[in-house]
């Protein structure tokens, strides 16, 4: 078993806050395939289309037959731990600060031998392990050797916690507490061990029974926050921005119009104002303080979650302006990712299909329940993935989009 | 003669014998706008975005862009705001005759009644009782309904919404017709969001103050404050809206001249 992660001591305010230093992040273009898969929670290696040889490290041509036809394919990761050791001295500042660091060498059943970060519950060598891929603080895919069978407190491994964004003992901001999704997020993340959850409240004169019930929880605090109002975002960031470890931006406006079903730009503009400009205001308000606290102890600032939509990938014309606003938000989130990357703050994008709310009332099932969406967000934090497609509809759209985005566009605009 | 009265006014203003009272709320992002069902078109609340503040965006100066609907904060309703006033001449903010924007004010104190009943409706009988004490409402006067609603600084209490909508005081249908037809008033002003009561959609006709006032080419003033500083009669108000092309209304600064 792994020693459980216990509540970190309060920070000593006399000492300088440690600067976030990323681990080595340089990768070849070929190697980014491993990162791209890990970003979606998958362990993939290149497999030669000609001779079936599995490749490691990633490369341009098959190490066995020199064929350039290499395809990224998901791996089960089972293998034999051949050797393990602790690194006590490293030239890399990131690892020096975190020594000792356990690593191992694993011969995968699929063929290649790989170097892995080794989970504390593994080994010693020789023994069976299962290799998985995760994103490290540089946002790059790395391999981790896990025990084959689940052990107690597996997620609490010190090295693994560097790759994940576990909400345990962390302080969370949920930008809109009035929606069912916001309330489910708050309850789910509290159940996952979050210390404190701020929930944003815009337009307080529009009462929300769900928010009033939520505010009775001891971990919940309501914070005035209206993403359409720059001064509100600045004030919230000034009040709590230096304390937020996980920011979940679930505030969204969803109106169900295409182009010609609604005259004028008011509804589309409101969607943009919240879904796109709201994210921009939040990023300018909360981004700097979060970046500064990305190495602030064992439960410092760690993740930024955006609630997007599967319609961000390809426009769903009946909800055309909403789709456009989510596509804009997706694009901006990529810029946010780039600006957050150096600090190690993970930007997680969530792409649900239709959520079971009043704006999707006319759509037939399946629709994603708020609780299911909340669970997928917490799982993403615990697994440290970057892109989440919760629910059957999102998975199906994603598969169609990955196969051929132009064909999906034609299907949706038929 | 007229020149003399202006000279006198200037002297009285300088000497404090005529006070200027601001009947205007500060335009701020927190000031609540009118609430409509979310599928309806929405009036933008007041928003401010910095252009620069003595910084890299403009080193020596501070200024903002702002945005809001025509009916935001303390604001003016022009006749064209309502369907009943749609075909009237001079019914928009750019064409309103400017002499209509300065005039005597009659302040009807309904503060006790509004405190007792948020859905209080100002009736003809109430107006007649007021006239018995303060004299007949003169032609072309502005009638201001004092409810002390502006003292509700908590936006939740100011909006006063429940599951059946907004609960704020306003005039009855008969009272509005009386003011327009029997007293020929220039306009009607309130401290609440709307010249009509919060539940006025259930009156006959719905929103009678909007319907009859604007149908007769008269004006509305909403979200006023400091009405408790005005005498029942004797004040003059100044309420020019922004001269926006074909505007249906406008945020504005409303001033009252009060014998000091």
Image (cartoon, helix red, strand yellow):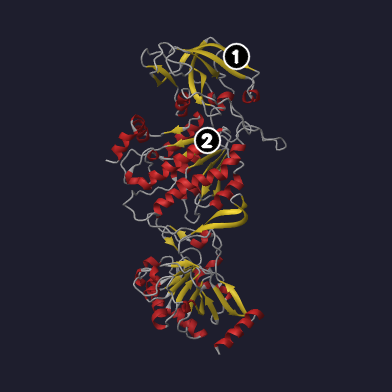
Q: Nearer the viewer, residue A118 or B248?
A: B248
The residue positioned 55% from the left and 57% from the top of the image is: B64
The residue positioned 54% from the left and 79% from the top of the image is: B236
Q: Which quarter of the picture shows residue A54?
A: top left
Mark 1 surroundings: few (<14), some (14-19) or many (≥20) residues within 10 A: some
Q: Which quarter of the picture shows residue A368?
A: top left
The residue positioned 46% from the left and 45% from the top of the image is: A276
Q: Percent position (x, y) of residue A14?
A: 73, 37
In the rendered image, the residue lying farthest to the right is A14
Looking at the rendered structure, whether the residues under marks 2 and 1 are on a common chain is answered as: yes
Q: Percent position (x, y) of residue B255?
A: 55, 73
Q: CA distance from mark 2 to mark 1?
A: 33 Å
Q: Secondary structure at mark 1?
A: strand
Q: Percent position (x, y) of residue B163?
A: 42, 57
Q: Percent position (x, y) of residue A407?
A: 30, 34
Question: Which mark identifies residue B211?
Answer: none
**Mark 2 touching mark 1, by CB under 8 A?**
no
The quadrant of the image that shows the N terminus of chain B is bottom right
**Circle 1 marks a residue in which chain?**
A
The quadrant of the image that shows the C terminus of chain B is bottom right
Say whether disc 2 or disc 1 marks the residue closer to the N-terminus: 1
Q: Nearer the viewer, residue B112 or A176?
A: A176
Q: Nearer the viewer, residue A85 or B94?
A: B94
Q: Which quarter of the picture shows residue A121?
A: top right
- Judging by the rendered image, the residue that carries numbered circle 1 is A85
- Judging by the rendered image, the residue that carries numbered circle 2 is A338
Q: Is residue A218 visible?
A: no
Q: On the rendered structure, is B157 left or right of A391?
A: right
């Amino acid at each position: 078993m792994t020693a459980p992660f216990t509540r970190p001591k309060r920070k000593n305010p006399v000492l300088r806050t440690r600067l976030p230093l990323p681990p080595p992040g340089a990768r070849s273009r070929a190697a980014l395939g491993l990162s791209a898969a890990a970003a979606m929670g998958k362990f993939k290696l290149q497999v030669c289309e000609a001779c079936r040889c599995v490749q490691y490290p990633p490369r341009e041509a098959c190490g066995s037959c020199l064929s350039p036809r290499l395809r990224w394919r998901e791996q089960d990761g089972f293998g034999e731990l051949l050797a393990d050791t602790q690194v006590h001295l490293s030239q890399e500042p990131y690892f020096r600060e975190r020594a000792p660091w356990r690593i191992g060498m694993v011969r995968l059943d699929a063929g290649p031998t790989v170097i892995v970060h080794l989970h504390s519950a593994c080994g010693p060598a020789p023994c069976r392990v299962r290799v998985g891929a995760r994103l490290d603080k540089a946002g790059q895919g790395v391999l981790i050797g896990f025990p084959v069978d689940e052990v107690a407190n597996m997620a609490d491994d010190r090295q693994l916690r560097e790759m994940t964004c576990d909400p345990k003992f962390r302080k969370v901001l949920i930008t809109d507490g009035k929606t069912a999704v916001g309330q489910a997020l708050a309850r789910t993340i509290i159940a996952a061990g979050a210390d404190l959850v701020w929930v944003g409240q815009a337009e307080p004169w529009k009462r929300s029974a769900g928010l009033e019930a939520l505010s009775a929880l001891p971990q919940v605090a309501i914070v005035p926050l209206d993403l359409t109002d720059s001064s509100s975002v600045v004030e919230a960031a000034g009040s709590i921005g230096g304390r937020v470890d996980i920011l979940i931006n679930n505030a969204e406006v969803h109106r169900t119009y295409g182009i010609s079903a609604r005259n004028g730009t008011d509804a589309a503009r409101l969607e943009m104002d919240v879904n796109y400009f709201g994210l921009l205001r939040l990023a300018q308000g909360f981004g700097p303080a979060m970046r500064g606290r990305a190495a602030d102890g064992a439960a410092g600032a760690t993740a930024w979650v955006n609630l997007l939509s599967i319609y961000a990938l390809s426009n769903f014309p009946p909800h055309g302006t909403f789709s456009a606003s989510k596509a804009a938000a997706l694009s901006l989130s990529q810029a946010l990712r780039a600006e957050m990357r150096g600090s190690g703050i993970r930007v997680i994008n969530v792409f649900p299909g239709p959520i079971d709310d009043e704006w999707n009332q006319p759509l037939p099932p399946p629709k994603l329940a708020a609780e299911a969406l909340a669970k997928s967000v917490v799982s993403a934090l615990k697994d440290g993935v970057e892109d989440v497609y919760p629910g059957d509809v999102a998975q199906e759209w994603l598969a169609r989009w990955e196969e051929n985005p132009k064909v999906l566009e034609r299907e949706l605009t038929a | 003669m007229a020149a003399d009265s202006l000279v006198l006014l200037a002297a009285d203003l300088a000497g404090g014998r005529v006070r200027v009272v601001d009947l205007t709320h500060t335009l701020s992002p927190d000031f609540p706008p009118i609430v409509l069902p979310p599928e309806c078109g929405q009036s933008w609340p007041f928003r401010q975005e910095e252009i620069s503040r003595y910084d890299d965006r403009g080193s020596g100066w501070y200024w903002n862009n702002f945005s809001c609907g025509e009916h935001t904060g303390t604001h003016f309703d022009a006749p064209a705001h309502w369907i009943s006033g749609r075909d009237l001449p001079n019914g928009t903010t750019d064409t309103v005759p400017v002499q209509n924007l300065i005039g005597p004010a009659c302040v009807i104190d309904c503060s006790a009644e509004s405190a007792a009943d948020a859905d209080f409706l100002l009736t003809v009988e109430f107006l007649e009782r007021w006239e018995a004490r303060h004299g007949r409402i003169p032609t072309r006067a502005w009638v201001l309904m004092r409810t002390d609603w502006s003292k509700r600084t908590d936006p939740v209490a100011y909006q006063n919404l429940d599951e059946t909508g907004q609960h704020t005081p306003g005039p009855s249908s008969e009272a509005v017709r009386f003011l327009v037809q029997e007293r020929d008033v220039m306009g009607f002003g309130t401290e609440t969001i709307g010249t009509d009561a919060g539940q006025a959609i259930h009156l006959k006709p719905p929103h009678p103050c909007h319907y009859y006032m604007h149908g007769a080419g008269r004006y509305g003033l909403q979200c006023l404050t400091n009405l408790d500083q005005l005498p029942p009669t004797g004040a003059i108000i100044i309420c020019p809206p922004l001269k926006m092309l074909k505007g249906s209304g406008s945020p504005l600064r409303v001033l009252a001249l009060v014998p000091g």
